Image (cartoon, grey):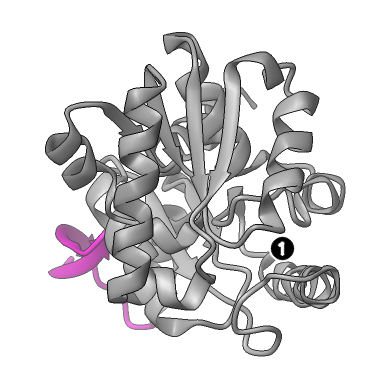
Amino acid sequence: MPIALFTISINGVAQHRHVATQPTRGALMSYFQHSAKAIPRFLIINPNTNQHLTHNIRKVINSSAPQGVMAVVTNPTHGPYSIETAQDKAEATQQVLALIETHKNEGISGYIMACFDDLAVSEIRALTQTPAISLAEAGIRSAAAGGLMTVITTFLDAVPTIEALSASYGLSERCRVVATGIGVADTAAQTEIAEIRLHQAMQEAIELNSAAIVLGSGAFAGRAQALSARYSIDVTDGFVAALDYVIQKAQQK
């Protein structure tokens, strides 16, 4: 029976497989269906429609996801460009849940909400019966072991939301939350004033003897390592911790 070489891509890395050919496409289709089931697939959702931010998140995920894992980063087609009000959050939640509906029959093993809010997380868990976590929960929990932490977020109205989240995780006494006062879009774009405010917040956290800094917005995606090196302090953005969580939970099912 003839043997053909086919290539698939996992996390951007080419994987080669030999497959026996048939007079029909049955063997090839069967192979890819088997591969799709064998490879755990995770959906990482930027809940706003900022494509630049989604691109940054995708780069972080592609560099962090382990081999043998398919991690897909996406965002809703419609909804707010940045989520900064209760109305934005309500609209984004509906758009995220609509997005989940389009993917729920694709064998997704877990979901990451790439924002510093538990937006839609409980709904996703109930709807899909699969692991789901936000950057907020993953980031705060992962930094908690070190003692006092400072969460640096963007706009001021996000502070009470994150304080309430840290309390719900039982970690409010070890979690200090500050804001740069700069919006999500400008933070992601790294405007001059956004960078000045971030520097000030980092310096203040260090002066207050924080053991770790948590970057409290998806707008900071991809910056943890460089900031940690620059300021000589542990910095996390929650992405690696969130991936670890959904992968481990999926393996336990």
Q: Quadrant of the C terminus?
A: top right
The image shows residue 150, relative to residue 147, as above or below, that is: below
Dot 1 corresponds to which residue? 104
Callout 1: SS:
loop
Q: Would you say residue 249 is visible in this rendering?
A: no
Characterize the local packing of mark 1: few (<14), some (14-19) or many (20 or more) Cα atoms within 10 angstroms: some
Quarter of image, res 38: top left
Residue drawn at 54 percent across, 62 percent down: 181
Q: Quadrant of the N terminus?
A: bottom left
Count the marks: 1
Residue drawn at 76 percent across, 45 percent down: 160
Q: Position of residue 5 (x, y in %)?
A: 12, 68
Residue drawn at 48 percent across, 56 percent down: 180
Left or right: 251 as drawn, with respect to 11: right
Quarter of image, res 59: bottom left
Left or right: 51 as drawn, with respect to 88: left
Q: Position of residue 45 (x, y in %)?
A: 57, 64
Q: Nearer the viewer, residue 136 or 129?
A: 136
Q: Would you say residue 152 is visible in this rendering?
A: yes
The image shows residue 104, relative to residue 108, as above or below, that is: below
Q: Main secondary structure of the magenta part?
A: strand
Q: Position of residue 19 (x, y in %)?
A: 23, 62
The image shows residue 45, relative to residue 248, as above or below, that is: below
Q: Position of residue 214 (x, y in %)?
A: 44, 36
Residue drawn at 82 percent across, 78 percent down: 91
Is residue 227 in the magenta section? no
Is residue 17 in the magenta section? yes
Q: Which residues are magenta?
A: 1-24
Left or right: 96 as drawn, with respect to 237: right
